[in-house]
Amino acid sequence: MNMNIQSIIERLREIMDDETLNQLKEELNGYHVADLADIFQELKPDERLRCFKLLEVEKAADLMEYLPPQMQVELLSDIDENLASQILTQLPHDAAADVLGDMEEDESETYLDKLPHKFSEEVRELLTYNENTAGGIMNPVVLTVNSDMSVQDVLNHIRIKAEKDNMELYYVYVTDKQNHLLGVVSLRKLLTSPIMQKVEDIMISDIVKLHVDDYSDYIIDEFMKYQYNALPVVDLYNRLKGMITWDDVHDLFEEETTEEIYQSSGISTEVVDEDEILSGNIFNAIRARTPWLFITLIGEFIAVNVSNHFNHTIDILPVVAIFMPLLAGLGGNIGTQSITLMVRGLSTGQVTLSSAMHYLLRETFIGLAIGSFFGILVTCVTWGWQHNIELGAIVGLAMAINMTMATIIGTFTPFALKAIKVDPAVASGPVIATTIDVLGLAIYFTLVSTYLVKVI
Amino acid sequence: MNMNIQSIIERLREIMDDETLNQLKEELNGYHVADLADIFQELKPDERLRCFKLLEVEKAADLMEYLPPQMQVELLSDIDENLASQILTQLPHDAAADVLGDMEEDESETYLDKLPHKFSEEVRELLTYNENTAGGIMNPVVLTVNSDMSVQDVLNHIRIKAEKDNMELYYVYVTDKQNHLLGVVSLRKLLTSPIMQKVEDIMISDIVKLHVDDYSDYIIDEFMKYQYNALPVVDLYNRLKGMITWDDVHDLFEEETTEEIYQSSGISTEVVDEDEILSGNIFNAIRARTPWLFITLIGEFIAVNVSNHFNHTIDILPVVAIFMPLLAGLGGNIGTQSITLMVRGLSTGQVTLSSAMHYLLRETFIGLAIGSFFGILVTCVTWGWQHNIELGAIVGLAMAINMTMATIIGTFTPFALKAIKVDPAVASGPVIATTIDVLGLAIYFTLVSTYLVKVI
C-alpha cells in the first residue's frame, strides 16, 4: 500500500487531459478511500470536484469520513443536490450530522428535507447536542438486544439488523423495554459462549458509560483509561442514546493534542477554533495569536524598565548590556524545557500533583548542575574574549543563577496552576519566558552594579 | 465510574492499618483494572506491593497492562517467583515480552525458564525483534482460518480457539498451509454472511498489512490513515507473524506525541529514551537537555558579538541597549508560533510541502499585520516614556521588521527541513529563536547607528 502520491496525481492529470472518463473512473474507484483522501488533499479544487463526481455513491460516502470538514462541505455543495442527498444517506448518522453541522443553516435544511424522514429526524436530534459533547459525537444507531434472548437469538438478530443498518459492531448492548442500559456483551464473548446461554448470564452489568453531556476531554480520558473500542452513551435516565467508537476519539485526541501544542507556544484556542487558525479567515488567525504576544509585550516592557532602572550602570560600563540576550535566551530555553516536561507529564498522568515536591527538587538539581556548567563555560569564554575576569565571573554567576531559577519557575508554575484548577498548558510558555527575562535581568544588573561597577 | 482516588486511597490505608486482609482483598478485586492502575500510581511502593499480592492472578495479569513499565518490573521482581510466572503466563505474548524485555537479562531468563515451553519460545522470538518495530510490538497469537472453510466452520473454530488462547478478536485472517496471508474477514462480515458461504468469497484480499521491520512512526501513520482496529504483520515472504491492535498503537502515538512536544522545546530524544527524561537517571535527563542549550549558547554568543560590533553605538546612546530583550522576546514569540503551526500541520497532514508557498505568504502577511500593529504601539509607548520620538520610531520599526522576519523564518524553516527529509520537529525551536535574536539585533543596531546616533 506504499504509493507515491505525486506520481499518482501526475497520472490522474494525464488521464483527465485525455478526457478518457471511463479510465479515470476505473482508476479512482480502485483506490482505498484512505488513499483517495490523500490524493484529494493534493488535487486542485476543480480537479477534486471532477474526480469526486466519478466515484460510486458508496465509495464517495466512505471517502467523506476521511476528508477534512471544509472539503466535505465544499464537495457536497458543488455537486448535484440529489447526488449529495444520496451520499449523505449512506453516511453513519454522526458523520452526516458533522457535515450538515458545518454548513450554513439554510443549506443544511435543504438537505435535511431531501433525506429519508427517519434518517433526517435522527440527524436533527444529533444536531441539537453541543458538538463537543458525547451527544454531538456519538452514533445513535446501536445494536440492542433484550436480556432474556439467547446467544443464538442474538446472532440471528445481528445477521438481520447489522447488515441492514450498516452498523458499526464491537459490542452488543442489552436494554430493557424502555431502552434503559442493562449490560454489554462483546462480540468475542458472544462467539465463544454456548449458543443456548441467556444474554443476561454472559453480559457485564458494571458498565463504563458516557453521558450525553460529557465533554470531549472527559471522553478522551475515559477511552484512554479503559481502552475499550467503544463506549455507550446514555441520558439522565440511563436510556441508551448512542455509542462512541475509538476512531471518533482518535480525531478528538488529535484535536486535543494540537490544542495542547498550540497553547504551549502562545496560540490561543479559546476564542478561535483550533482548525481555523491554520487555514481559516486570516483575521481569526491574527486574533488567536495576538493575546499572548500582547502579554509578552507588557512583560518585556517591565524587563525594559528593569534595565532602565540600571541605566547609570550601562552608562558607566556599556559592555554589560551586550550580554543581555545571552542570559535571556538560555534562561528562557531551560525554563521552557522544565515547563514542557511538567505540562506534558501532568497531561499524560506520568506526573501527579502529589509528586510535585519530588519534581521540584529533581529539576532544581538539574538546573543547578546545567547552570553551573554553563556558568563556568561563559565565565571562561568571556574572560578570554574581553580580557576581564571580573566581568566573566559576574556574567557566569548571573547565568548559573538565572538558569537554576528558570527551572524552578518552569517546574513550579504548572503545579501551581494545576492546584488552582487552571489548565497548566494555557498560561505556560510566553508568560514564564517573560518572567524569567524580568527576574534574570534584575539579578544580572544587581550583580553588576553591586560588584562590577564598584570594582572599576 | 467517577471516583475520588484520594478518598479511595485513604480508605484502603485504613483497611491496611486494621490488618483486615479479607476486606482489603475483596475491595481491591472489586475495582476495574483501569481504576486499580490509577490507585496503584498513588500508593507508596510497599503499600502497592501489599495490595498487588492480594489480587487474583487473572486480575493481576490484567492490571499489568495498565501499569507503567518500571512498575510492572518492580512488582514482578518483588513477589514470589512462581506467582510472577503464573501472572506472566496469563499475559498476552506481546505484553509478556514487553515486561521481560524491560528486565535485566539474567532476571528475564529465570522467568523464561519457568514459563510453559511453547509460551516462552514465542516470547523469546518476540524479544529478538527491535522493540520499536512491528515485530517487537505485535501479538503473535492470531486467529487464522483456511480459505475453503465455510462461515459456520469459522464460527465453530472461533468458539474453540479464541476462548482457549485468550485471543484478541477483531478480524479473522485467512492463510494457506504455509501460513501466507491471503485475506481478512471482519467479525461483522462473518456474522452477517450466510453460514454456508465460503470464506474466500467474503474475505478482502487487497489487504493493508505491516511488515515485521516497519518502524513505529510508519505503523502509527498506517493506523491513522486507514483507521482499522487491527493490522496483520507479515515477514518478507508474506507469512503471517502476528497482529497489532489499536491499543498498542495508542501507546505508540502517545509516545510519539510526547517526543514531538519534547523536541519542540529543545529536549533531545535521540540519545535518551523519552520516558527516561522525566523519571529515569538524573544524568540522562541532563544529557537530553544539554545539547540544544549548548547550541543556544553558541547562537547567543553570536548575538553578543553582533551587539559588541555596535559597542560604539551603545557608548554614545546607552538607552538603546535596554530595548534588546523587548525585540528578542517578541520576535522569538511570534516566530515560535509560526514554527509550531507549520510543524504540527506537517505532522497531522493539514499542511503539505506543495502548499508551502501559500503558507509562506499567509504567515508573512500575518507577521506584517501584527508586527506593524505592535511596532506602532511600541513607538507610541517609547515616545511617551522616553520623550524621544526618533528613538520610539526606530524601536518600533525594528520591532515590525523583526516580527515579520520571525514569522518568515519560522514558516520557511520547517518546510526546508521537510524538503531535505529532516524531521521538522527536531531543529525547530531553540535554533530558530537564536537565529531570530541574531538577525533582530543586527537589524536594530543597524537602524540605530544609521539613523539615530547620527541624528543626535
Image (cartoon, coloured by chain):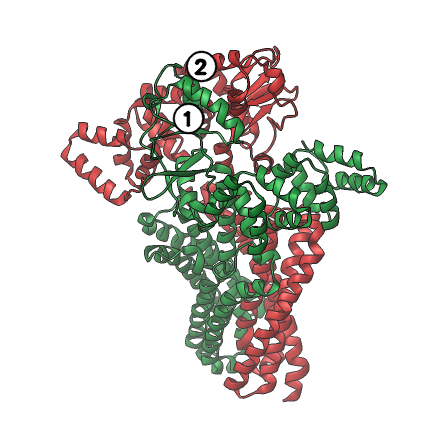
Chain colours: A red, B green
Residue labelled with disc 1: B186
Tell whether A342 sits left or right of B262.
right
Choose between A262 and B169: the one closer to the eye. B169
Tell me whether marks 2 and 1 sit on the same chain.
no
Q: Residue at x 29, y 29 (%)?
A: A52
- Single out the residue that lies furthest toward the right: B18
Residue A184 appears in the rendering: yes
Q: Residues within 10 Å of mark 1 (few under 14, many from 20)?
A: some
Tag 2 secondary structure: helix
Q: Which mark is residue A159?
A: 2
Choose between B190 and A269: the one closer to the eye. B190
Q: Residue at x 20, y 40 (%)?
A: A11
Host chain of mark 2: A
The relative height of residue B213 versus residue A310 in the rendered view (above or below) is: above
Q: Specify the amino acid type for callout 2.
A: Arg
The relative height of residue A54 versus residue B91 in the rendered view (above or below) is: above
Tag 1 secondary structure: strand
Q: CA distance from mark 2 to mark 1?
A: 14 Å
Choose between B39 and A221: the one closer to the eye. B39
Q: Residues within 10 Å of mark 2 (few under 14, many from 20)?
A: some
Tell whether B281 sits left or right of A87.
right
The relative height of residue A97 versus residue B455 in the rendered view (above or below) is: above
Residue A306 appears in the rendering: no
Where residue B174 appears, as percent x and y from the top left, is 37, 29
Host chain of mark 1: B
Say how many tags the image has: 2
Where residue B321 appears, as percent x and y from the top left, is 53, 74
